[in-house]
């Protein structure tokens, strides 16, 4: 499957939005900054970038698997490519944790928040950390905080690869739609029957599965060149999702808010799927905007940036200013800009020297002809 620049650009939008949330919104909120309110509001919704990643992942993974023959070789090829893409940089981040903890003074500002082991480290090795985070109501230490979403991703890969293997091709759309509806029901039952369910709504696969499945359903829909009616429908869905979030944020649902909260991931996923549809068969303006070189490059480097943007910021502030990451003055703003430049430079180096060679090798490995039974190895 050839790469489409608009989809790389969409991935770039997602990662820049996530980084804005961690580098701008959270530090500004902690410092009580009020300047640039529109920018801060936009950055404050940067967590939606993760939901956008989930929908895009569901689209690409389902599209890749649905076109494969239903045999073990396709299953093996899929997992080989996913493992070579995800595990190396992920393992590098996990290895950096004990090293950084050993070098970091325990008396440093925020050291306990950065390096605590409330989530067992072994759980990260098997992508099960989210199962500990849900009952604790805690996303883990700052160094490894973003890895909850990697657990959800890998669990989805397992789910969808088995589901598409078992469900006949002609029945995939109704089954995936039914599973998406079951996901909404699961969130309602969790939210209405369990106190302190917020973390579980965020980090458990059944709570987030509809986002992946909406992307998957879009992948299974017939692909046609962009048409005005379809473009208008996608724009309308995107606007409706934005309006829902704005009303919920302002308390406009009032007494019905408790019933609206379990729906907002679904509404967000519909909006993200509409945005994805605009980029999957883009019109000229969308192609030019989303295919712009800065967004495409950000999308290409997004995985490393996502994993390492918080550790890099922690290091820049600790070794440069002797503080935890914050905003509030020119020095802090400069340090945050340096952290962003640094993680982008490291991501570019990692992709060229480490990640891309492994990706190429995994594709060659998956394409290697399988030996016939009884043939010499």
Image (cartoon, grey):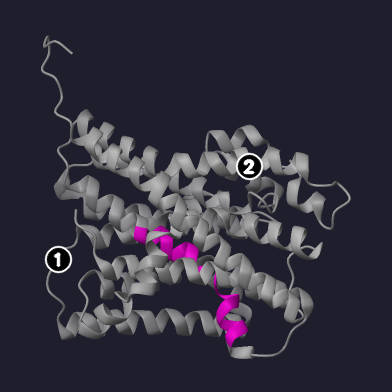
| Residue 279 picture location, percent across and down | 27, 73
The secondary structure type at the circle numbered 1 is loop
Magenta part, dominant SS = helix
Give me the disc on residue 13. Answer: none
Quadrant occupied by the C terminus: top left
Q: Nearer the viewer, residue 180 or 358?
A: 358
| Residue at screen point 54% across, 85% down | 247
Q: Which residue is mark 2?
A: 96
Does the magenta segment cover residue 228? no
| Residue 101 picture location, percent across and down | 75, 42
Residue interval drawn in magenta: 39-56
| Residue at screen point 56% across, 34% down | 125
Q: Which residue is mark 1?
A: 223
| Residue 295 picture location, percent across and down | 38, 72
Does the magenta segment cover residue 41? yes
In the rendered structure, the answer to whether residue 214 lies left or right of residue 130 reads left
| Residue at screen point 42% across, 54% down | 209
Q: Residues within 10 Å of mark 2 (few under 14, many from 20)?
A: some
């Amino acid at each position: 499957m050839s790469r489409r620049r608009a989809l790389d650009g969409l991935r770039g939008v997602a990662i820049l939005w996530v980084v804005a949330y961690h580098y701008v919104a959270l530090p500004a909120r902690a410092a009580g900054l009020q300047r640039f309110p529109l920018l801060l509001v936009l950055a404050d919704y940067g967590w939606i970038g993760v939901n956008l990643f989930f929908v895009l992942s569901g689209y690409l993974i389902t599209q890749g698997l649905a076109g494969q023959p239903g045999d073990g070789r396709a299953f093996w090829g899929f997992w080989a490519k996913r493992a070579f893409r995800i595990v190396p940089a992920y393992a590098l981040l996990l290895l950096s944790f004990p090293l950084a903890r050993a070098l970091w003074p325990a008396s440093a500002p925020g050291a306990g928040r950065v390096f605590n082991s409330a989530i067992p480290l072994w759980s990260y090795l098997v992508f099960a950390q989210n199962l500990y985070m849900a009952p604790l109501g805690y996303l883990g230490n700052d160094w490894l905080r973003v890895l909850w979403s990697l657990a959800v991703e890998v669990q989805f890969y397992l789910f969808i690869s088995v589901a598409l293997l078992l469900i006949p091709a002609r029945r995939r759309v109704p089954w995936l739609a039914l599973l998406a509806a079951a996901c909404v029901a699961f969130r309602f039952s969790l939210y209405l029957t369990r106190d302190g369910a917020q973390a579980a709504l965020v980090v458990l696969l059944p709570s987030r599965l509809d986002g992946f499945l909406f992307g998957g359903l879009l992948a299974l829909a017939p692909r046609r060149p962009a048409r005005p009616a379809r473009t208008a429908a996608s724009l309308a869905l995107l606007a409706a999702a934005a309006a829902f979030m704005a009303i919920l944020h302002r308390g406009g649902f009032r007494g019905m808010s408790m019933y609206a909260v379990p729906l907002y991931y679904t509404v967000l996923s519909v909006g993200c799927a509409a945005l994805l549809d605009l980029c999957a068969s883009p019109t000229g303006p969308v192609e030019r905007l989303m295919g712009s070189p800065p967004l495409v490059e950000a999308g290409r480097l997004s995985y490393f940036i996502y994993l390492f943007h918080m550790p890099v910021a922690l290091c820049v502030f600790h070794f440069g200013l002797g503080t935890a990451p914050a905003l509030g003055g020119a020095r802090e703003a400069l340090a945050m800009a340096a952290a962003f430049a640094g993680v982008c430079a490291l991501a570019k180096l990692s992709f060229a020297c480490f990640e891309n060679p492994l990706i190429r090798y995994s594709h060659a490995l998956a394409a290697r002809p399988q030996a016939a039974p009884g043939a010499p190895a």
